[in-house]
Image (tube, grey):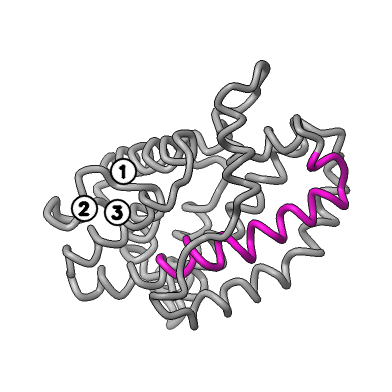
Amino acid sequence: MSTESGPGASDDMALLGLMQLVSPALPIGAFAFSQGLESAFELDWVKDEKSLGEWLAGVLNDGLARCELPILARLQVAWAAADGEAISYWNDWLHANRETAELAAEDSRLGASLARLLGSLDLLPDSPFLPEKTGYVTVFSWAAYRRGVPLRQILLGFAWAWLENQLAVACKALPLGHTAAQRLVERLRPALVAAVDAALVLEDNELGPVLPGLALASALHETQYSRLFRS
């Protein structure tokens, strides 16, 4: 049997690398964070499949599409140009847009965990290009760039990982079955594509999340009496 690589082998390896990055089995501890969703349950803002779908659609459209996704695109340009100044700028910009202590800590801890994992796989960039306090989005962007993943797939993969994590949180903390979670996946798949489309055309002065409800939920979660998640 031939073991030579075919013409699509590099694309296949890039896709497999992306699947590795967005897998729930990636050992970086993402399962421990709810991004304010657990507090929304406690406050009864989200209580069933319908309200969860509305919450997720809002966070996607007014959060990821205006913050993480367009910054991922800008970071790809920066990595390709070996532009350490731009990498540091967008890493700091993301940190400044984490509106609560828990959201900032989540980004920092996941970033550190992913960096340690990549280091153990000999996949980290040269040290001058990785900021000292690197957030998760920045490290994710490097790993995807290192794997040669096309831009749209990077953004779709990141959004998909976010959606899967949020639904896993809901299945643990709400009376939401896995079939209901899959219905939400079907409902929100087109929204993921639309969010990527929107993110790719935003100018710099249009960036920034507009999520006062999530910020409030996250702040209240810091003092919530009983918690399953760290954010």
* Magenta stretch contains residue 168: no
- Circle 1 — which element? helix
Q: CA distance from mark 2 to mark 1?
A: 10 Å
Q: Are marks 2 and 3 in contact (CB under 8 Å)?
A: no
- Looking at the image, tell me whether mark 2 or mark 3 is earlier in sequence order: 3
Give the residue type that dot 3 points to.
Asp
Q: How many marks?
A: 3
The quarter of the displayed image where residue 228 is located: top right
Q: Residue at x 42, y 35 (%)?
A: 105
Q: Establish if 176 lies above or below 142.
A: above
For the C terminus, the image quarter is top right
Badge 2 marks a residue whose secondary structure is loop
Q: Which residue is mark 3?
A: 92
Q: Compared to 182, does 155 lie above or below? A: below
Amino acid type of disc 1?
Ala
Stretch of the chain drawn in magenta: 45-71
Numbered label attached to residue 101: none
Q: Which residue is mark 2?
A: 130
Residue ID for mark 1: 115
Contact check, label 2 and label 1, Cβ < 8 Å: yes
Crowd band around label 3 with a 10 angstrom C-alpha radius: few (<14), some (14–19), many (20+): some
Where's residue 60, x and y in %?
63, 61
Magenta residue check for 52: yes
